[in-house]
Image: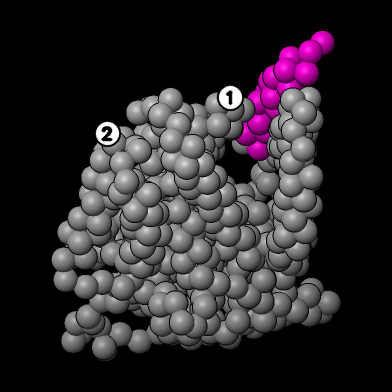
Amino acid sequence: MSAETLVQLLYLVSTALFILSLRWMSDPETARKGVFSGVAAMTLAVAGTLAGVIATGGTHYWWILGAFALGAAVGYPLAQVPLTAVPQRTALSHAFGGLAAGLVGTAKFFLYFGQRNEAALAPFIVVALVAEVLLGFLTFTGSLLAAGKLQEVKWIPQRPVTYPLQNVSNLALFALALGLGVALVLHPLAPWAPWAFGGISVLSLAFGVLLIIPIGGADMPTVISILNAYAGLSAVAMGFVLNNKLLITAGALDGSSGLILSVIMCKAMNRSFFNVLFGAFGQAQTKAADDEQKVYKADTTESAAQIMEQASLVVIVPGYGMAVAQAQHKVRELYDLLKKRGVTVKFAIHPVAGRMPGHMNVLLAEAEIPYDDLVEMDEINGDMPQADVALIIGANDVVNPAARADKSSPIFGMPIIDADKARTVYAIKRSKNPGFAGIDNELYFLDKTFMLFGDAKAVVGELARKLAGEGGH
């Protein structure tokens, strides 16, 4: 078997494992196998590349090994972050992928330009180079900013930042970058070509920041999946530049899965891509005069525990507040205590709850809550009128009835969990501040709703202690 055949065989097996990884990770029962499959696929991809370099007499394979070691040194501590930080860690991964694509594209262009290699700078390759750098650098800065927003870095505004003619100016910058790209395709070896390429790179870096600044935290799950798609597409372009079939395949899988997930996220919010990217969703709303008269009804954990103990069905609606407080293990304690008393407990999962797709599923799975009790929004809504108690833990916009009734609301039309149809509602919140959409939640002012203010972990822990204490009498 020739060295080239061996390399292509390794790439083929790696491609198959990447596909199987996505397939297995679509089901909780096979998700762990999917992770191992993805790791094996990437290991084989690196091994195949290294084998190809050695077989062709290359002497720079030590650079590959060095990069592999550096990547492992950075990746290992990133893998140790708590599950509450997975969204920002995911954004950082996208940033690294985008940066890698952008740097490879830049290196290739200047190498070919320096060699005056007209054949290597054929129109198709230059188009791929421009796409690679444009999407790669855009993903890099956009993902870094998204990670900063998710981490709630002090100097990065969490609310959307808007200014006059924002969308027009952003699109004008993007059009300028595309114009420079067209000029490069037509004249790749012109004296001004390096400057044009540098201009595309700078505009791409700037556009990534400008694209994310007007996006609020409520849209972060969709933004994460869109950035995932951008990173995948930049990898596809890089595959064409390097003539690497595995990169093309893996990038296409990454890009298409990110795009499909983005469609699912947008559908879950009843919004379009254009509205997510340019709608500045999450701006603080001006309160009407009658809103000032609304008051919350606070209750005690003792009273809430008594109500839940007597219930037949309790539906728990987790949200970002549960993630921030790292309350998932206390939620498991509460779940166990209620189940011991014969109470049926279900978890209502909204597709965009949290700050990344599947955020709540991951946290609850960490607490080893049976996956069968995690119910998607469309399925659980039919059971909400029979629920004796809806316990909302740090969720806000995804249970706001204004999405159904108030046409003036920025979330109007967004599918929600029908928590307001339960007989009694308890809502755990850190403060009286509105959610990321910047509006008050009408659910919290209903006669049937009672507030339990405080850190979610502390409040749920207190509920569990009250239930345990009552069980001892």
Label 2: few (<14), some or many (≥20) within 10 Å? some
Of the numbered discs in the image, which one, if any, rests on residue 407?
none
Residue 345 picture location, percent across and down: 64, 56
- Above or below, 459 against 174 in this view is below
Of the numbered discs in the image, which one, if any, rests on residue 186?
2
The residue closer to the viewer here, 343 or 401, is 401
Secondary structure found at label 1 = helix
Query: Where is the N terminus found, in terms of image quarters?
Result: top right
The residue closer to the viewer here, 127 or 347, is 127
User: Dominant secondary structure of the magenta stretch?
Assistant: helix
Residue underneath mark 1 = 245
Report, in whole angstroms, how far the alpha carbon at label 2 lies from the one at label 1: 26 Å
Give the magenta part as a residue range. 1-25
The residue closer to the viewer here, 373 or 58, is 58
Quarter of the image where one finds residue 306: bottom right
In this orientation, does residue 334 appear? no
Q: Residue at x 48, y 70 (%)?
A: 149
Residue type at mark 1?
Lys
As drawn, which residue projects farthest toward the top?
Answer: 1
Residue 417 picture location, percent across and down: 43, 55
Q: Residue at x 66, y 31 (%)?
A: 18
Residue 72 picture location, percent across and down: 77, 53
Secondary structure found at label 2 = helix
Residue type at mark 2?
Leu
